[in-house]
Amino acid sequence: MVCHAYRRGPALDGEARMMRVDDLKARAAAAIDEVAPRLYEVSEAMHAHVERPFEEVKGQAWLCEVLSEAGFQVEKGLGSLSTAFRGTVRSSGPGPRIAFLCEYDGLPPYGHSCGHNVGGPASIGAAVGLKSVMDMLGGEVIALGTPGEEGGNGKHIMQREGFFDGLDAMMLIYPGRDNIAHSRALVATRVNFSYFGRAAHGAARPEWGINALDAMTLAFNGIGLLRQQTPSDVRMHYIVTKGGTLSNVIPDHTSGVLTVRANDNATIDMMIPRINGVLEGAASMTGATLEKTWAEGPRGKPLLSNDAMAQLFDRNLQALGRATRARDELSGAWSGDTSNVSWAVPTIQPQIAMTAHPPHSHEFHEASVGPAARAALADSAKAMAMTAIDLMLDASALDAVKAEFMARTR
Ligand SMILES: [Zn+2]
């Protein structure tokens, strides 16, 4: 949990403080400009060598290299995760512990279509920028490498193993369509399901067969119609993992996976029996047998984006010349493993405008290198470092972040 053990020195008043803040931010931004060519190099190398969750050895090595060059104390491999890492710099004085989270896995064959090759190096840039002014601020800056985001829930593992303990605030960014400081993410769960029928020759004796693919087809049609009667934040999407074996045999076994997401757990709880009804109805219509398993364990929580911290980030991003906009109901309709840890440490996970293409598409991967990707990387590194300076220089700003966090997690 958050710690209140330190206290900053006497607050500077009015103009003196503004000058000091602006000076520190300018210095941090200059340090980021200096390291930017290395960050672009790493970002582009990651893009050319996309690695799967928990196999991010190259990404880990490249990001840690930049941290070492910048004078961070680097640990590679944390707890049970060999591709996690931590780069730390402690200043001479007391102060908050601020972390920038780095993600560096991709989604082969869809490449870096989530932009982790932009967000990961941006967090390293923010850490390097903040380090350059640390001795004037006190406290500690941490670049925390959190592997296995794309379906691996790496941050949940790291949280269980204590790597988020004692942090005062943390942040990371995602490139996307817009500049949105107050982002959100959905709660998600999924069901694995199979239909079992009876195989028969598709032409000679079709009447003898029980078609497990018909059951699957009806299930997905039913889910499609169910969308009309769901709240607008509900997302349902699915794949068929087994559709049959031979085209001249009535399929006797099919299976699929369906993910459902919504703004909160109450909506998911409302959706589960309705999805079950559709899956069971499809079995009953065809005579097939249904077996299903909903994902086990805690389902996770929605992202708790800290509004007080997001406001600071928003102002800093605007100061860098980016027009920001408020989140709307549909922005950030994805999920991620930051959500759970955002209930343990005050967190923001803003979106930075890079491309209008949707994440998890080939086009997004293509857009994750080039001038817009470089600009997104540099600007988000600066905005994160500047936000950390706001929190470290002004005790009342950090107090507001913590008070909000305490109130919303009580
Ligand atoms: Zn993703």
Image: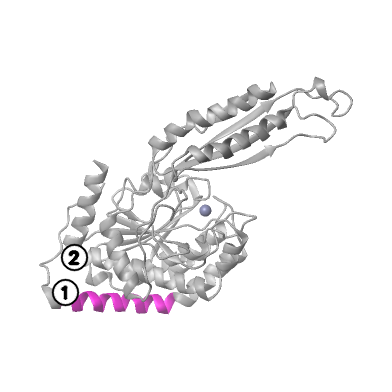
Residue linked to disc 2 = 394
Colouring scheme, one of rainbow, by chain, secondary structure, one colour: one colour
Is 14 included in the stretch rendered in magenta?
no
In the image, residue 311 above or below residue 163: below
Marks 2 and 1 in Cβ contact (< 8 Å): yes
Residue 190, given in percent of the width and then of the height, sits at: 53, 37
219 on left or right of 14:
right
Identity, as a three-letter code, of the amino acid under mark 2: Asp
Would residue 130 be seen by someone viewing this image from the given angle?
no
- Res. 341 mark: none
User: Residue at 84% across / 29% down in the picture?
Assistant: 202
Residue 295, given in percent of the width and then of the height, sits at: 51, 33
- For the residue pair 284 and 304, the one nearer the viewer reads as 284
Residue linked to disc 1 = 17
8 on left or right of 86:
left
Magenta stretch, main secondary structure class: helix
202 on left or right of 173:
right
- For the residue pair 8 and 334, the one nearer the viewer reads as 334
User: Residue at 46% across / 69% down in the picture?
Assistant: 66
10 Å crowding of disc 2: few (<14), some (14-19), many (20+): some
Residue 193, given in percent of the width and then of the height, sits at: 61, 31
Residue labelled 2 has its Cβ within 8 Å of some atom of ligand 1:
no
- For the residue pair 316 and 121, the one nearer the viewer reads as 316
Would residue 336 be seen by someone viewing this image from the given angle?
yes
